[in-house]
Image (cartoon, rainbow, N blue to C red):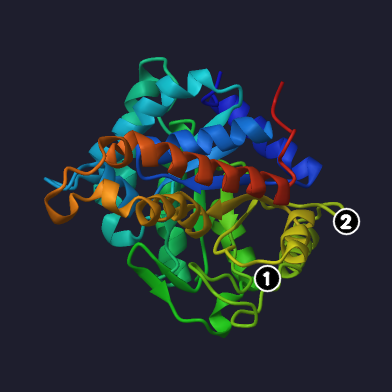
Amino acid sequence: MPIATPEVYNEMLDRAKAGKFAYPAINVTSSQTLHAALRGFAEAESDGIVQISTGGAEFLGGQHNKDMVTGAVALAEFAHIVAEKYDVTVALHTDHCPKDKLDGYVRPLIAVSEERVKAGRNPLFQSHMWDGSAETLADNLSIAEELLARARAARIILEVEITPTGGEEDGVSHEINDSLYTTVDDAVRTVEALGLGEKGRYLLAASFGNVHGVYKPGNVVLRPELLKELNEGIASKYGQPAGSKPFDFVFHGGSGSTAEEIATALENGVVKMNIDTDTQYAFTRPVVDHMFRNYDGVLKVDGEVGNKKTYDPRTWGKLAEAGMAARVVEACGHLRSAGQKIK
């Protein structure tokens, strides 16, 4: 069962919260990067999440028409086949989708799973993300309510981002400022709209200073302890026992985070951490090294014929896969998911 059923995906998230670990959510843009993610999970003996952003789906759809739904569906179907060869369980997820792309991405993909479920099958994706961080919180949650109802009916989990993550992700950008911190009031309004599971399960991308992309230490002030305040605020308001963790948190913009910051986030209920920038570099770096070392082989210099063995995409593609897989293994170690696969 390499691709998680809805029941197993729920079990994965429950195990992560109880065990204070999180699943790396690896963005993929090709069959090669998909295999790299799966290989990394398998080598780390970790279950995990593979995700496709709107930009990644557009790329997967081909540059002739750049259709996001076609790209996402094609790779998901491919994943259902090739993941059978990896001894880990993986969930398929779609990453950031802003309001202007909902009708061209998430809503059609939910419809695909609705039809599959009606036919007695499992959904194609196990979760989808609605990124309403550029909208007012009222509008954000109104759309989230609609999507959560549809997701629940299709046996899908919804991820919501209620306040901004800094930096830029597939054309959605926010300044790095004090708005990058979710408040208890934001959390309360979220629960008032989406409930605490009775309306459907959702993952919450709360903001604690997160920034997408690459940044050096000191440029951003992360406050993962804020997640504890959000959980405590909701637990107190809704009469839950002390120490409860009502939310399944997602850590966005984690590139450059310290081990201590990640550990604090895990202690406070993070069950999923998005990783894209670091794995992009890990995939590309071995390719660059290969091209520099084999310049006169990959190019037909001064009328020569080059060396087919060096410019064959399989040669440098294998190096890229290995480099990215190694970074996924590293992420599993940081997030404590290594060795935690469902037996």
Q: Which residue is mark 2?
A: 242
Q: Given the current orientation, which residue lies at the most extreme right position?
A: 242
Q: Locate residue 161, reporting x and y percent.
A: 51, 61
Q: Dot 2: what SS?
A: loop
Q: Which residue is mark 1?
A: 184
* Pointer 1 or 2: first along the chain: 1
Q: Is residue 237 visible?
A: no
Q: Please rate how many residues cluster around mark 1, counting C-alpha atoms within 10 Å: few if below 14, some from 14 to 19, many from 20.
A: some
Q: Locate residue 318, reporting x and y percent.
A: 43, 36
Look at the image and tell me in which quarter the N terminus lies: top right
Quarter of the figure with residue 187:
bottom right
Q: Dot 1: what SS?
A: helix
Q: Locate residue 57, reporting x and y percent.
A: 30, 46
For the residues labelled 1 and 2, say whether their Cβ atoms are less than 8 Å apart.
no
Amino acid at circle 1: Val
- Does residue 275 sit above or below 108 in this rendering? below
Taking 115 as reference, is 260 left or right? right
Quarter of the figure with residue 125:
top left
* Residue drawn where x is 48% and y is 67% of the image: 213
Amino acid at circle 2: Ala
Depth check, front residue: 42 or 318: 318
Taking 51 as reference, is 242 left or right? right
Look at the image and tell me in which quarter the C terminus lies: top right
Alpha carbon distance from label 1 to label 2: 16 Å
Depth check, front residue: 11 or 300: 300
Q: Is residue 30 visible?
A: yes
* Residue drawn where x is 77% and y is 58% of the image: 263
- Does residue 261 sit above or below 145 in this rendering? below
